[in-house]
Amino acid sequence: MSGFLDEMARSSALRVKQATAHESFAALEQRAKAAPRSPPLRLSAAGFDVIAELKLRSPAAGSLSERGDDWLARVAAYARGGAAAVSVLTEPSRFDGSLEHLRQAAAALQGLGVPAMRKDFLVDPYQVLEARAAGAGGVLAIVRMLSRSQLSQLLDAAAEQKMFVLLEAFDTDDLAAAEELMRPRHTARAGEAAGEQILIGINCRDLNTLEVVPARFEALAPRLPRGWPAVAESGVATGADAGRMKRLGYRLALIGTALMSSGEPAQLLREILEAARTVES
């Protein structure tokens, strides 16, 4: 595991310890059960979708939100632009995120029929329940940061809450671990019937330098597990980028920095979707 992921894992575990000191697992579980049901993640028949991201700060790019920027309006713009889901960073130390951002975003998206996804460095099922209690319909889990047991627990917790999971991989070892983890659980069709919806993401960011390495998408495309929608993460900023991802076999792209930097995020999102959906896969 990289130094960055190790730092994030330790920080995340500390947040869990602090949170459980104030609210027990059982009490949080009751709040999660009482939360309004999230809109489901629906993938378009057009063949390509985008998970748009609310990211106020990036360790690589610095602040992505101007003072006074109405980030909640940006979340609504993502939904109007056709986002299948909105990823909300909740990590506080390096990304300026919070569970309050997730709560507000999920509430705004509820009436627009779009689910929110908690993006963080999750290490414990408690954090899945935090996401559901805040209104989220999905969570991200980083394969190389967690043991097989931890990953199984996160997937179990998400399935119980009827939440989708984006399993994030960085290399062939991660993909092999993810496939081995998923194989005995369900086939894709049976998994959906059981309330389990899993996406496989390839993050092309180098965790040591934090630079984007787009060639990783092409190198890992042949190793993507069949039967689960693949997500291209980082490095997708234009319609041409998205079209290239579709040709490689990716079903979605997770886009953060480009949309956060745009003055017209809904229009940019529509342009990206239109460009990708006209490409033959």
Image (cartoon, helix red, strand yellow):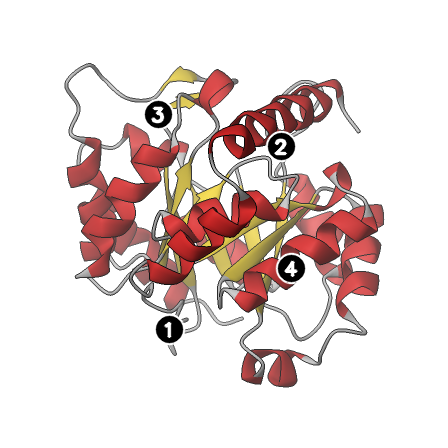
- Secondary element at image label 4: helix
Q: Determine the CA span between mark 3 and mark 4.
A: 27 Å
Q: Quadrant of residue 113?
A: bottom left
- Secondary element at image label 2: loop
Identity of the residue drawn at 59% across and 30% down: 212
Q: Determine the CA span between mark 3 and mark 1.
A: 28 Å
- Amino acid carrying label 2: it is Arg
Q: Is residue 116 visible?
A: yes
- Secondary element at image label 1: loop
The crowding category of the residue bearing disc 4, from other C-alpha atoms within 10 Å (few below 14, some 14 to 19, many at least 20), is many
Q: Can you identify the residue that label 3 sits on?
A: 56
Above or below 147: residue 189: below
Disc number lying in front (4 or 2)? 4
Q: Determine the CA span between mark 2 and mark 1.
A: 27 Å
Disc number lying in front (4 or 1)? 4
Closer to us: 231 or 40: 40
Q: Determine the CA span between mark 4 and mark 1.
A: 24 Å
Disc number lying in front (3 or 4)? 4
Q: Can you identify the residue that label 4 sits on?
A: 155
- Amino acid carrying label 3: it is Leu
- Secondary element at image label 3: loop
Residue 103 x %, y %: 30, 43
Q: Earlier in the sequence, mark 2 or mark 1?
A: 1
